[in-house]
Amino acid sequence: MDMTKQKKIDALLLGILLIGMILALYMAFLGAPRERTMGDLQRIFYFHVPCGIVGLLAFALNFVASVIYLIKKDRKWDSLALSAAEVGVMFFTIVLVTGPIWAKPVWFVWWTWSPRLTSSLVLWLLYLAYMLVRGYVPDPERRAVMSAVFGVVAFLDAPIVWFSIRWWRDMHPSAMIDRGGLDPAMVPAFLTCSLVFLVLLVYMIRRRLFLESARVELERLERAANLVR
Amino acid sequence: MIEVQGLAKYFGRFSALHDLQLDVSEGQFIALFGRNGAGKTTLLRILAGLSRPSAGSVTIRGFRPGSQDARGFTGYLSHNTALYLDLTALENLRFYARLLDLACSDGDLETRISGVGLAGRAREPVRNYSRGMQQRLAIARAFLHDPALLLLDEPFTGLDREGTELLTNYLDEARSHGRTCLMAIHDAPLGYALADRLVVIEKGMVALDLERKASTLEEFQGRYRDLTEEC
Amino acid sequence: MAGKVWAVLRKDLLIELRTKDSLNAMLFFGIVVLVVFNFALESLRDSIRTAVPGVLWVSFVFSGTLGLNRMFASEKENSCLQGLLMVPMDRGVVYLGKMLAAAIFMFIAEIVIFVCSLIFFNLTVWSEIPWLILVFSIGTLGFTAVGTLLSAISVNTRMREVLLPLILFPVVLPILVNAVEATNIILNGPDYRALKLPLAIMTSFTVIFGTVSYLMFDFVLED
């Protein structure tokens, strides 16, 4: 791994992020039109939804990395899986926090058991469970295998969870409906925010991966040191 | 029969095995010596296919340990008996016989049970057995399919005198039938008496590898002591 | 191979018949949960029939989790699993045998808990029974299909059995949601045609996770 090249990429990403975040904030608060019914509160949508999308991408990455790890047994895939899962959980935490902030003034309740919010909660719990599995297996090689298996299970479960909750909601409709559809005037802001969060995802996973790789390397060095003793 | 090259097994910061090299021919009988934590159990478990190597290569008759082919001719005995305490001795063996596709009648199995000195107690739950008796039954269980490769991890620990005699006879008989055997053992005189080859594992590597014929027991014990003391 | 799966299954059934460890615990716990719910849902006393599907399945899931925990705890004793791993057979045989054993125990517990609920909540169900059996069966199979794999994972962690509910419950949520709804449809209407979707989802879940667990089981068992 060429350190300077990696540092350059990270610096570039950080630069894009700083500019991008400012641009995204502008677009979301000033560039996009004011929504008719909810007013400025609706602007939270530009952060709430992209975080969800990007979180899902992170979990998808965890799935792919887990599968590859199970086939190749190369530790770096395990490190990637872990990084993706952690960052995914972070993004979903944002989704779960912004959801109620949005819901309270509009629906006068903190929590709506809407399909999207409920599925997000379950997905968040699934990957917290992934972190739990990792937390309680002391041996690194075993930990990698166990969590990879669970990562596969969790990701395959996600669509089934989504369908089940969607259908359940159809059976028990509530007054609060998830707003679908997007006014064309809002699209640029939405896209900008989505892209910026995507760059944030890549940047954060890279940083986390770097940290994890360092840890694996430290482990290897300690092993070598223990041998000499 | 067995080829081990550059074998390593890590548990995080700890290397149980590190760059281990070992070649075993068919019919050889190896006694594995070493301090606690030297790596004997780890090596045996990897050969049995119960544990995967972290690095290096291991083949048994050309197969990967733990593959179905390898398992077919490997038998493993540790101080965990792998016996179901709530089943009788006969039921335990019957269960394994069925899984191993062995066409053993109850009579055959009872003969084996008698063979390990438990005649008349075949229909008692294993929970009622003493530790030594359970260990003896474990011998019958582990080698039910008469495997070509016997892997034993300190099998004499926990055996009473009758059991020790029984196992010694069993191993002698296996040897005369050309079976290959790797046995981790603490008791140097016993290991020396049974084996063709004496291997000492220290710090995850082979530290000493002697033909039994090439050394007396005292010489071997001396070298063993030096090895384990100087480290 | 079917013979070997049967051998593993039969072994677990035989041990359970002798010790009755799992079943006793599962039955007792399931019934206790019913009793607790009675107090918890006192305000729903008149319309308890609407709450029964949820109560039943929570009870089933808690009880089933107990059973799953026992599944591998008993193999840990004496490292019996080691013996199974040395046998030259597809290790998926162990998965299938254990899964079916867990499903059978859970189903037995469900029947008893269900009968108790009929008594506790004064319900009458006759024509609904075949449908209920269908929903209970598929739900149980789905639950144990993934539960067996996760139980094998959790038993190898530091927290052992304590971890299982934590990692299992989020995963089996689809089974829970659909099973409760299906049970609700059977007990409280509208009509049986609405059962198609929940049963389809539960069956897909069972097939997907049964296959995936079977394929990945080997990874979890080895050291």
Image (cartoon, coloured by chain):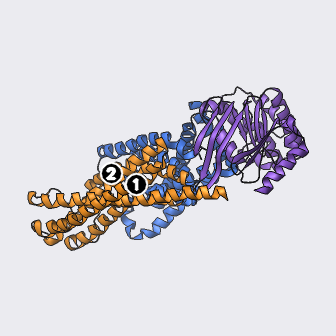
Q: Which mark is residue A164?
A: 2
The 10 Å Cα crowd at callout 1, few under 14, some 14 to 19, many 20 or more, is some
**Do marks 2 and 1 both belong to one polypeptide chain?**
no
Q: In the rendering, at what x and y percent does residue A182 appear?
A: 14, 57
Q: Quadrant of residue B156?
A: top right
Q: Which of these two is toward me, B168 or A206?
A: A206
Amino acid carrying label 2: it is: Ser
Left or right, B191 with respect to C153, comes to right
Q: Colour of chain A?
A: orange
Residue contact at pointers 2 and 1, CB within 8 angstroms: yes
Q: Which chain is blue?
A: C
> What chain letter is assigned to the residue under label 2?
A
Position of residue A47 relative to residue B160, above or below, is below
Q: Which of these two is toward me, A192 or C152?
A: A192
Q: Residue at x 27, y 67 (%)?
A: A99
Left or right, A112 with respect to C147, comes to left
Q: Residue at x 24, y 72 (%)?
A: A104
Note whether residue A2 is visible: yes
Position of residue B64 relative to residue B159, above or below, is above
Q: Colour of chain B?
A: purple
Q: Quadrant of residue B101?
A: top right
Total marks shown come to 2
Q: Which of these two is toward me, B137 or A173?
A: B137
> What chain letter is assigned to the residue under label 1?
C
Q: Which residue is mark 1?
A: C173
Q: Which mark is residue B9?
A: none
Left or right, B140 with respect to A56, comes to right
Disc 2/disc 1 C-alpha distance (Å): 9 Å
Q: In the rendering, at what x and y percent does residue B127 appear?
A: 76, 49
